[in-house]
């Protein structure tokens, strides 16, 4: 069986400066303007849903899925309180959350859906949603970033995500909310003079963007560990393993870099990745406990709903 449900994928920066204070920096303003181009690009794909994985929504015990059909709350960024409060109200595909969680559970991983008033959606997802889907034209789906998952587990989840998307049958855009380099300035800065905190980080970021512009997602996934080590990749840049598995672990894509700017020293980019062939859907295979010195461990089996 081949997948045709994923119409496009995007790597986007979800820092609050882009949403709340774009006028303070030329780079932040550029990213804000480029978000409009990404939104127009997404609208042309004819999707009905946007699926987000954000490195700012961290989970510890397995993988969490937003199942509240209408989450409504307010949010202050934990690092930049001075930027103010963001109020949000989204439209979530709660049925897909259950389907998604079930597919990940079949891979032998612990899953949990959340559905209660006031559960905090992370700033990265909120920024992306407000700029890509400001009128709630599309239903949203959200999966957490397991902070302890290594490559093997992330790949299994990506494959499970693809199965869930294909089973649901609805055309979807997939959005990975993640910085490239994630080395912030550790002191107050003049916003107008924001720059990359490390020249080496900037060089590595540009190498990654060159590959993505050519659609070489598999190659990026292969060098993710080196990139994370050298440029302090956001959450080890592990989100790229999930995205690559979801899109078929291939370099057969088209790519487009919409923008690349520093955000408080970190690498913020907006990139489109477009599949050019149908992705083969793999049958679920449960994670096998490690017998050596690998990081991945045998997962929990039960499923919970909060």
Image: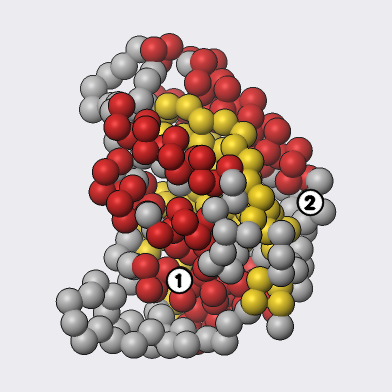
* Callout count: 2
Residue 151 location (% of width, % of height) = 37, 68
Q: Please name whichever residue, 166 or 132, is drawn nearer the observer in this view of the structure.
A: 166
Q: Quadrant of residue 294?
A: bottom left
Q: Is residue 94 above or below residue 120?
A: below
Q: Which residue corresponds to the image point at 81% horizontal and 46% vertical from the top-left?
A: 44
Q: Separation of disc 1 and disc 2 at Cα?
A: 25 Å
Q: Please name whichever residue, 245 or 286, is drawn nearer the observer in this view of the structure.
A: 245
Q: Which mark is drawn over residue 272?
A: none
Instruction: Indicate the quadrant containing the N terminus: top left, top right, bottom left or bottom right.
Output: bottom right
Q: Secondary structure at mark 1?
A: helix
Q: Secondary structure at mark 2?
A: loop
Is 294 left, or right, of 280 in this rendering?
left
Is 158 left, or right, of 34 in this rendering?
left
Q: Are marks 1 and 2 in contact (CB under 8 Å)?
A: no
Q: Quadrant of residue 276?
A: bottom right
Q: Quadrant of residue 146?
A: bottom left
Residue 147 location (% of width, % of height) = 32, 61
Q: Which residue corresponds to the image point at 64% horizontal and 77% vertical from the top-left?
A: 280
Q: Which residue corresponds to the image point at 78% horizontal and 45% vertical from the top-left?
A: 43
Q: Is residue 240 above or below residue 281?
A: above
Q: Residue furthest left?
A: 293
Tell me how the rendering is colored: secondary structure
> Looking at the image, can residue 34 be seen?
yes
**Label 1 Cα crowd, 10 Å radius (few <14 / some 14-19 / many 20+):** many
Which residue carries the number 2 mark? 45
Q: Which residue corresponds to the image point at 63% horizontal and 59% vertical from the top-left?
A: 252
Q: Which mark is drawn over residue 155?
A: 1
**Label 2 Cα crowd, 10 Å radius (few <14 / some 14-19 / many 20+):** some
In the rendered structure, which disc, 1 or 2, sits on the residue that comes first in sequence? Answer: 2
Residue 54 location (% of width, % of height) = 47, 52
Is 78 left, or right, of 126 in this rendering?
left
């Amino acid at each position: 069986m081949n997948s045709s449900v994923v119409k496009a994928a995007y790597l986007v920066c979800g820092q609050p400066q882009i949403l709340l204070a774009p006028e303070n920096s030329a780079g932040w303003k550029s990213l804000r303007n480029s978000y409009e181009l990404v939104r127009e690009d997404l609208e042309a794909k004819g999707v009905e849903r946007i699926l987000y994985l954000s490195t700012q929504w961290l989970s510890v015990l397995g993988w969490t899925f937003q199942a509240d059909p209408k989450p409504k709350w307010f949010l202050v960024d934990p690092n930049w309180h001075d930027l103010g409060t963001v109020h949000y109200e989204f439209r979530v595909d709660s049925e897909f959350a259950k389907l998604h969680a079930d597919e990940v559970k079949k891979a032998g991983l612990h899953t949990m859906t959340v559905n209660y008033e006031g559960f905090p959606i992370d700033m990265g997802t909120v920024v992306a949603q407000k700029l890509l889907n400001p009128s709630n034209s599309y239903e949203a789906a959200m999966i957490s970033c397991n902070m302890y998952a290594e490559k093997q587990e992330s790949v299994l989840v990506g494959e499970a995500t693809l199965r869930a998307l294909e089973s649901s049958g609805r055309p979807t855009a997939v959005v990975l909310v993640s910085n490239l380099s994630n080395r912030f300035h550790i002191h107050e800065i003049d916003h107008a003079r924001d720059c990359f905190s490390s020249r080496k980080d900037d060089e590595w970021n540009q190498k990654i963007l060159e590959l993505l512009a050519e659609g070489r997602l598999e190659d990026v996934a292969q060098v993710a560990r080196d990139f994370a080590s050298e440029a302090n990749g956001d959450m080890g840049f592990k989100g790229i393993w999930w995205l690559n598995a979801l899109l078929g672990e291939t370099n057969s894509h088209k790519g487009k870099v919409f923008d690349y700017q520093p955000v408080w020293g970190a690498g913020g980019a907006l990139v489109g990745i477009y599949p050019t062939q149908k992705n083969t859907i793999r049958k679920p295979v449960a994670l096998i406990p490690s017998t050596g010195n690998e990081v991945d461990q045998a997962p929990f089996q039960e499923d919970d709903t909060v």
